[in-house]
Amino acid sequence: KMPRGQDVLREDGGDESEVLRPLNATGKGKLIVIDGLDGSGKQTQTKLLLEALSHMGHPVRQVSFPTYGKSSALIELYLSGAFGGRAGDVNPYAASTFFTVDRVASYLGDWRADYEAGTLIVADRYTTSNAIHQAAKLSTEQKRAFFAWLDDFEYEKVKLPRPDAVFFLDLPPALGQE
């Protein structure tokens, strides 16, 4: 059974989770990510979380990735098979950069001002999707180096905001298809 409304926020019935406590010293907002495989309920849970947070009086904003706008042209080519018929035809480092560029363009051109003004941003997918999908192409031994590179690239090099909380929806694929 998928959690509903405020169950997403806290299992103990409290009004706010640690993520929602007062803004940090910089005055920036918070970033909450809902991630999971296709069909896991990300859109549904994102909508429920936004409704609950708004009802609680928090300034909230949703972002979704990929954006499928101008900055996602390489993503669309990649997903359509233009660079090869299998996901493994594009190495995970190259594929990750496609998705990173889309997030950077979205952040800089769309939601950075809201985030810096204290808005709570709820993302349907974010940098964790690169880790989830691209690491599947790698051996166990290669994953640690990839995760370190990805963390450095996304958060240190291109300066995307680091999430305050990530909720990974772990739902069996068959259940998600119902």
Image (cartoon, rainbow, N blue to C red):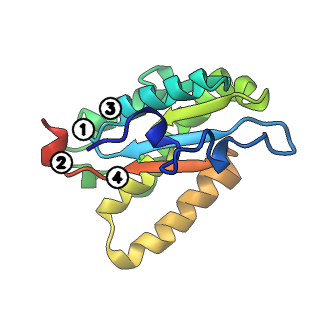
Residue at the disc numbered 4: 133
Task: Say whether disc 3 or disc 4 marks the residue closer to the N-terminus.
Answer: 3
Type of amino acid at the residue the image marks with label 3: Leu
Q: Secondary structure at mark 1?
A: loop
Residue at image location 65% in from the left, 31% down from the top: 120
Task: Say whether disc 1 or disc 2 marks the residue closer to the N-terminus.
Answer: 1
Query: Is 140 displayed left or right of 171 in the figure?
Result: right
Whether the residues at callouts 3 and 4 have beta carbons within 8 Å, the answer is: no
Residue at image location 45% in from the left, 56% down from the top: 93
For marks 1 and 4, give the CA distance.
Answer: 14 Å
Badge nearest the viewer, 2 or 3: 2
For marks 1 and 2, give the CA distance.
Answer: 7 Å
Tell me the crowding category of disc 2: few under 14, some 14 to 19, or many 20 or more residues within 10 angstroms, Cα based.
Answer: few
Residue 162 appears in the figure: no
Task: Say whether disc 4 or disc 2 marks the residue closer to the N-terminus.
Answer: 4
Residue at the disc numbered 1: 39
Query: Is 178 displayed left or right of 116 in the figure?
Result: left
Frontmost residue, 166 versus 89: 166
Task: Say whether disc 1 or disc 4 marks the residue closer to the N-terminus.
Answer: 1
Residue at the disc numbered 2: 173
Which residue lies most toward the right here?
Answer: 25
